[in-house]
């Protein structure tokens, strides 16, 4: 059993900030006030293994970290990083979307993630780059671009 699931759950409070807006391909992607784009890393190898083994708390925490990584990339404005983090968010949702907390988080960020992939070519190019990196680490074996398109609700 995952030790993190035995700890008392606490709600992390984020400082409110002014609405921050960055642009990707001419479309605004507003960074929500509840997102942390600095000092947000909480997942270590133990927590990741717990998530893989079924710990719902760790799965939600992993999704939160992926969301933070996505918006951090948006704040920096690097197209390749934004696409890579968007792909990672879709993959995390694919893996853990059966957890209600992960589903709720996905619903909050889904539209921004989908804005990143306006065409099939953009998606396929980003998927290939992302998948090469994952295969080198022996991850995402057997994952196809069509699976991620289907789970995310992209209509390309």
Image (cartoon, helix red, strand yellow):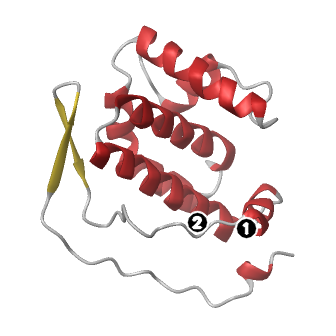
Q: Residue 48 in the image: x percent, y percent?
A: 73, 60
81 lies above or below 123: below
- When asked about the image quadrant of residue 24, the answer is top left
Residue drawn at x 63%, y 57% is 99
Q: Residue 102 in the image: x percent, y percent?
A: 55, 56
Q: Nearer the viewer, residue 102 or 89?
A: 89
Q: Residue 120 in the image: x percent, y percent?
A: 44, 11
Q: Which mark is residue 147?
A: none
Residue drawn at x 38%, y 65% is 38
Answer yes or no: do the residues labelled 2 and 1 have beta carbons within 8 Å? yes
Q: Nearer the viewer, residue 103 or 86?
A: 86
Look at the numbered disc 1 and give the secondary structure of its residue: helix
Q: Residue 57 in the image: x percent, y percent?
A: 65, 70
2 lies above or below 120: below
Q: Earlier in the sequence, mark 2 or mark 1?
A: 1
* Residue wearing tag 1: 47
Q: Is the C terminus in the top left, top right, bottom left or bottom right quadrant? A: top left
- When asked about the image quadrant of residue 19, the answer is bottom left
Residue drawn at x 50%, y 32% is 152
66 sits left or right of 74 in the view: right
Q: Is the N terminus in the top left, top right, bottom left or bottom right quadrant? A: bottom right
Q: Nearer the viewer, residue 63 or 36?
A: 36
Q: Is residue 156 visible?
A: no
* Residue wearing tag 2: 61
C-alpha span from label 2 to label 1: 9 Å
Label 2, residues with CA under 10 Å away: few <14, some 14-19, many ≥20: some
Residue drawn at x 37%, y 12% is 119
Q: Is residue 102 visible?
A: yes
144 lies above or below 32: above
Determine the residue located farthest toward the left in the rendered image: 18
Look at the numbered disc 2 and give the secondary structure of its residue: helix
């Amino acid at each position: 059993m995952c030790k993190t699931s035995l700890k008392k759950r606490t709600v992390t409070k984020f400082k409110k900030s002014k609405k921050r807006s960055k642009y990707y391909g001419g479309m605004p992607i507003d960074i929500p006030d509840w997102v942390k784009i600095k000092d947000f890393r909480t997942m270590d190898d133990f927590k990741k293994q717990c998530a893989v083994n079924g710990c719902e708390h760790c799965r939600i925490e992993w999704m939160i970290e992926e969301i933070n990584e996505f918006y951090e990339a948006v704040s920096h404005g690097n197209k390749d990083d934004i696409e890579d983090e968007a792909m990672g968010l879709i993959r995390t949702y694919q893996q853990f979307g059966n957890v209600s907390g992960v589903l709720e988080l996905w619903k909050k960020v889904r539209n921004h993630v989908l804005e990143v992939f306006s065409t099939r070519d953009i998606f396929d190019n980003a998927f290939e780059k992302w998948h090469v990196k994952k295969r080198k680490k022996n991850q995402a074996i057997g994952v196809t671009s069509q699976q991620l398109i289907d789970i995310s609700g992209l209509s390309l």
